[in-house]
Image: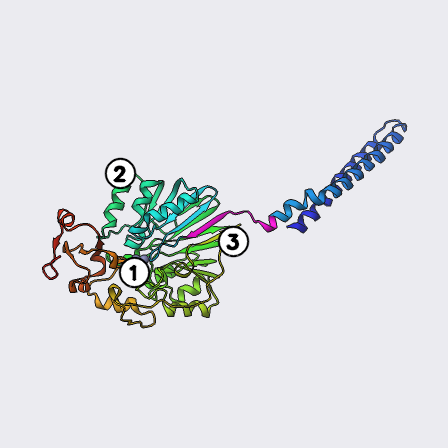
Amino acid sequence: MKNRTKKNRPKYNKTNYSQSKKKQKKQRRNPLPFLLIPVLVLVLVLGARFLITRLSDRGGQGKTDQTAPEVSTDEQPEEKMSVHFIDVDQGDATLILSDGHAMLIDAGGNAKGTAVQKYLMDREVSSLDYAVCTHPDEDHIGGMDVILTKFDCGQVIMPDVESDNASYPHLMDVIEDKMIRTMDPVPGTTFDLGQAKCTILAPAGEYEDTDLNNWSVCLRLDCGDSSFLFTGDAEEAAEQDMLAGDRELGATVLKLGHHGSSSSSSPDFLDAVSPTFAVISCGKDNDYGHPAEKTLEELKSRDIKVFRTDLQGSIIATTDGEQITWDKEPDQSWQPGVYKGPWGNHDSESEEGTTEEVHKIDDSETDSDAAGDRSATDSYDYILNTNTMKFHFPDCPSVGDMADHNKEGSNLSRDELIEEGYSPCGRCNP
Ligand SMILES: [Zn+2]
Ligand SMILES: [Zn+2]
């Protein structure tokens, strides 16, 4: 850029100069008396002197005047977009800002809504253009009711699937009460967010109603040459459906699906996206073994640089449309998560990241999200079965048999739960 500007400038002057010469030639041919010639010569000489003086003056001052903005452009590239991977413990929440426009992809679990709200307020976000609920699992939409209550939002983008967790009706109530427009995530749909362009890529297939992860809204953001791919909790089936489509998947940054679990980020998908950077959003010492050792190995073998919210807290990437700048160095630990068994049973059954599968086999019903409702359950007084409408003590053996997507933690009192329509379990008699 610098060189081009410098080359252009003399060219421009030259052109002007030769143009005036041409004009002068034309005037020569003019049948005006010869008397005019000395006058013209004088004008030319004076004009040329004036021009030379001005140019050299410029040259002198120019070193401060003109190099200053060039230097500052080099050192502080204009920020066209920033992407904030907010640390919400076990869950997802990503804020994208560009030119005063804002989009939030997921808002963490129920307990994190206020923290995400504070993060947005600290960034002086007053309203959201878009709120994306990738899929209705608790660790993604739990905090969204708070966000949509506190901030005005242009549109909510969410897949057409329901969840029976306690957060889902709260979210739907807010959307209805505030009459927020909702957008169907039809693959191929594009929209602008400030200087960035957003393309919806998934859900690109049909899945079981209970297979919530694969229903995840996936989208890519392009800002100049920088691109980001967000895949929610999409697992291999959804990745295959995206690969089967014709849409561009290649991206500079991939936010790894399903918190770095081995059920996502299949080799084919990683090859197609071919990211330079990967971001993993998961909780410190989470019970699910996220990120999986297998996933980390796939990343390492491809020389992909990794950022992790569990080890590094919130992570911010900014781009000027050419380069992506990170507020932290990539994590070098390559430390996989340790599976601690269902419900934080700390007898490690860690089997290099196959925890999701183990869990799915345990549950005869389809497990929508092993990383979902169980997070931080040890801090709850009661565990609810949203399907049978029974409530249990956390150590009740029935809790272990419960399908994950029916489990909810609660700190309501016994009476309040009964008022809400729950009845005490006959085994643990809470
Ligand atoms: Zn999920
Ligand atoms: Zn999740």
As drawn, 94 above or below 47: below
Kindly report the distance in space between the C-alpha atoms of the residues bearing marks 1 and 2. Answer: 29 Å
Q: Is residue 160 left or right of residue 55?
A: left
Kindly report the distance in space between the C-alpha atoms of the residues bearing marks 1 and 3. Answer: 33 Å
Decide if ligand 1 comes within 8 Å of the CB at mark 2.
no
Of the numbered discs 1 and 3, the one sitting upstream in the chain is 3
Answer with the quadrant where ligand 2 appears in the image. bottom left
Label 1, secondary structure: give it.
Answer: loop
- Percent position of residue 265, x then y: 38, 64
Kindly report the distance in space between the C-alpha atoms of the residues bearing marks 2 and 3. Answer: 40 Å
Characterize the local packing of mark 2: few (<14), some (14-19) or many (20 or more) Cα atoms within 10 angstroms.
few
As drawn, 166 above or below 51: below
Label 2, secondary structure: give it.
Answer: helix
Q: Check if residue 373 falls in the magenta segment.
A: no
What amino acid type is highlighted by mark number 1?
A: Ala
Q: Is residue 307 left or right of residue 357?
A: right
Residue 92 is drawn in which quadrant?
Answer: bottom left
Give the residue at x 28% y 42%.
Answer: 175
Q: Mark 2 and 3 residues: CB-CB less than 8 Å, in contact?
A: no
Residue tagged 2:
177
Decide if ligand 2 comes within 8 Å of the CB at mark 1.
yes
Q: Residue 225 carries which label?
A: 3
Q: Mark 1 and 3 residues: CB-CB less than 8 Å, in contact?
A: no
What amino acid type is highlighted by mark number 3?
A: Asp
Residue 123 is drawn in which quadrant?
Answer: top left
- Percent position of residue 39, x then y: 87, 29
What amino acid type is highlighted by mark number 2?
A: Asp
